[in-house]
Image: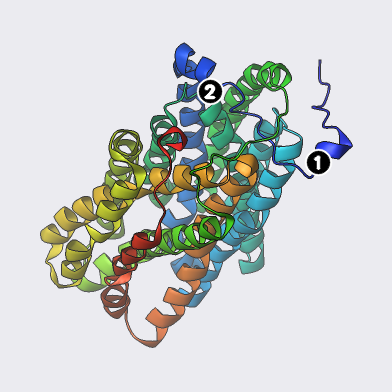
Amino acid sequence: MNKPVIVPAETLTEPVVVADVAPGAAKAAGPAYVVLAGISVSHFLNDTMQSLIASVYPILKDTYALDFAQIGMITLAFQFTASLLQPVVGHYTDKKAQPYSLAIGMASTFFGLLLLSAAHQYLVILVAAALVGLGSAVFHPESARIARLASGGRYGFAQSVFQLGGSFGTSMGPVLAALIVVPFGQGSIAWFSSIAFLAILILWRIGRWYEPQIKAKKTIAVQAHPDAPSSRRVVVALLVLVALLFSKQLYVSSLSSYYIFYLIDRFGVSTQTAQIYLFIFLAANAVGAFFGGPLGDRFGRKIVIWISILGALPFTLALPYAGLYASAVLSVIIGIIISSTTSSIIVFAQELVPHRFGMISGVFFGVAFGIGGLGAAVLGKLADHTSIEFVYQVCAYLPAIGLLAVFLPRLPRHMR
């Protein structure tokens, strides 16, 4: 029942595909909505637990007298672990898919939450955050592959459904922290381990669906389309996509990690009120992430990338000078626009290098986490030496990097 996928030695150096062997058949069958719903719900549960880390920063800062640089290091410990390991996981599963790895990886998140709830030293907090990051590293590459396998050829739609779960889960973290963790303290984080257990059960069931899908597919070499971009243009395009993801993710990271402190410092609101405002921004991200993929399927991913990143620039420039309620409105507009690019960037990269689907997914999910973690640490250091308001004034110009989209190639229609 648990035989591995056997790849002949002579084909190990050739490009391979597990998920898209029979795209015509997949499109005829249509999306597997139950599987897409299951993987999206799992993404929701996974990212809900992860977002608790940033949401409890005010509690950790007050309890352990941490400065902003130390807060940034917690984010770095969590996200940098995921950044380093996701491409490795993706590369390994390209050669040998692991249908039950998702459930096993979720166990790391389970133990990370338990450790964080009981941590009383800064080093232990860092280790707990790293364990949650490890669970993310295992979860994202294979779950993105499953979403594509269940897409029925609607790749942008499937990626958006997958991203919707994660974005909505991220937005729920501040609300749950405000309702549970703030009133009941750090120890209440352990209650969320029950969410991890539920996710393990769902992912184990999805693994049972995934296993026969792997066995039914034959490993084949990918034939390059004559109109496909050259290898050099593919490399340039991937670098551009990484830069675009950098501008998007670093800006979102600045709001996710420090928006609470910004609102408290500038407007004097309470921690719980600031967490509700953060929820509003993250919920807007979830809405944008859902609509971005289908729009990319319909109008082309390059157009969506152009509009979503550059379109946010006027609003990010206005945010540092807005009042409290205007900031909430602007954050919603920014969240919807800027997050709509995520699915298009990831699917665009997957289509550029379809024979390394898991590795590319891991690299881009990993880059997203790594940029967020590294950016949070750098921005925290900058905030210590200047102010939170200055950080937001600097980050307001990040969407201008979207101009690099001019270097993206036009893909043949069959690749889109």
Determine which quarter of the picture holds residue 154. top left
Note whether 13 is above or below 399 in the view shown.
Answer: above
Task: Please report the residue visible at 58 percent of the width from the left and 50 percent of the height from the top.
Answer: 117
Whole-percent x and y of residue 136?
59, 46
- What amino acid type should be assigned to the residue bearing mark 1? Leu
Name the residue beneath numbered marker 2: 23
**The image quarter in which residue 33 lies:** top left
Residue closest to the far bottom: 385
Which quadrant is home to the N terminus?
A: top right
For this view, does 410 lie left or right of residue 87?
A: left
Q: Is residue 126 visible?
A: yes
**27 shown above or below 283:** above
Q: Is residue 259 left or right of residue 199?
A: left
- Could you say which is closer to the camera, residue 193 or residue 89? 89
Which residue matches tag 1? 12
Q: Is 82 drawn above or below residue 356 in the view shown?
A: below
Coloured how?
rainbow
Identified at 54% across, 58% down, the residue is 367
Q: Secondary structure at mark 2?
A: helix
**Residue that sits furthest to the right in the current view:** 9
Label 2: how many residues lie within 10 Å, few (<14), some (14-19) or many (20+)?
some
Number of numbered tags placed on the structure image:
2
Position of residue 302 measured from the top left corner of the image (x, y, whole percent)? 34, 49
- Answer yes or no: is residue 109 visible: no
- Amino acid type, mark 2: Pro
Cα distance between the residues tagged 1 and 2 = 22 Å
Q: Position of residue 413 (x, y in %)?
A: 40, 36
State the image coordinates of residue 14 (x, y, percent, origin top left): 75, 42
For label 1, count other residues whose C-alpha is less than 10 Å away and answer few (under 14), some (14-19) or many (20+): few
207 left or right, relative to 342: right
